[in-house]
Amino acid sequence: MKYTAVNFVSADIQDWQKDLLIADLGDIGFDTFEDTEEGFSAYIPSSNLDLQALETLLLHQVVDYSLDYQVQDVKEENWNALWESNFNPIVVDDTCYVRATFHEAKPEYTYEIVIDPKMSFGTGHHQTTSMMLSYILENNFQSKNVLDMGCGTGILAILASKKGAKSVLAVDYDTICVDSVKENSELNNITNVKPLLGSKEVIEGQKFDCILANINRNILLDQMSTYADNLDSNGELYISGFYEEEDLPILRKFCEELSFSFVSNKVLDKWCAAKFIKK
């Protein structure tokens, strides 16, 4: 697959502003990001690059800071070397070790997850994914029917399975993600994770004991009513992909209107994850 790099340069962008911009770039198809000395680079399959959509996004997003960018093609033979050099193993809560296929195994950890990113989101490195993994580690998933909404690589679904889930439905609207879930499930010898292409419409009428949704605030608000309908009484909802100060009060109020009880939240570098129980 041919990729294009958009190299962003800014002398005064703040970390939180960069995080918001990266999140919005993800919404228009960019799927890999790399810090540089002058800013950061964003990568997208060349066939998905829409310069008009990029210009529109920047027009509305870039406020109170300067930003320039340059577009360049990435040589195909350099792509794997690029993401491999930026993909390092991580450890979550001293319990779960997440690595790629080209990293050494470490059987001393209780849980080991092998992920072949395939340029899709969800390797555990982002703060939101790390917090969601932490929530799964802390809670009981034994014999539960689980939904992983916006599953990316399937990392959350795989850990839920390793924690004893009876079944896991992994839903994403991106075909690359659906294929990635299949491959990563095989890498981890997981047989009870079912990937499914689509969005909230494909889960209507189904019931779950637990829902995992690491997406973003707007999609969470759009899909929350569906989660409420599909979650059994006393079922657990774990959400992330939003900020604590700006977004958590909005999401908490909306969830409580749908008969969810707030349990707790986690914060990492201004990003937030939260747990709710369906009444």
Image (cartoon, grey):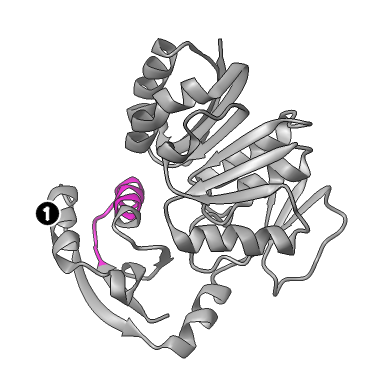
Q: Quadrant of residue 51?
A: bottom left
Q: Nearer the viewer, residue 159 or 138?
A: 159
The image shows residue 200 at horizontal and vertical percentages of 42, 37
Residue numbers of the magenta segment: 9-24
- Residue hosting label 1: 59
Give the dominant element type of the magenta stretch: helix, strand or loop. helix
The image shows residue 86 at horizontal and vertical percentages of 54, 70
Q: Is residue 46 above or below residue 135?
A: below
In the image: residue 141, left or right of residue 73: right
**Quadrant of the snapshot with the N terminus:** bottom left
Magenta includes 100?
A: no
In the image: residue 38, left or right of residue 233: left
Q: Quadrant of residue 249?
A: top left
Q: Determine crowd level at label 1: few under 14, some 14-19, many 20+ residues with C-alpha closer than 10 A.
A: few
Give the residue type that dot 1 points to.
Answer: Leu
In the image: residue 250, left or right of residue 139: left
Which residue is drawn at the image coordinates 21% and 67% (left, top)?
50
The image shows residue 185 at horizontal and vertical percentages of 69, 57
Which residue is drawn at the image coordinates 34% and 22% (left, top)?
250
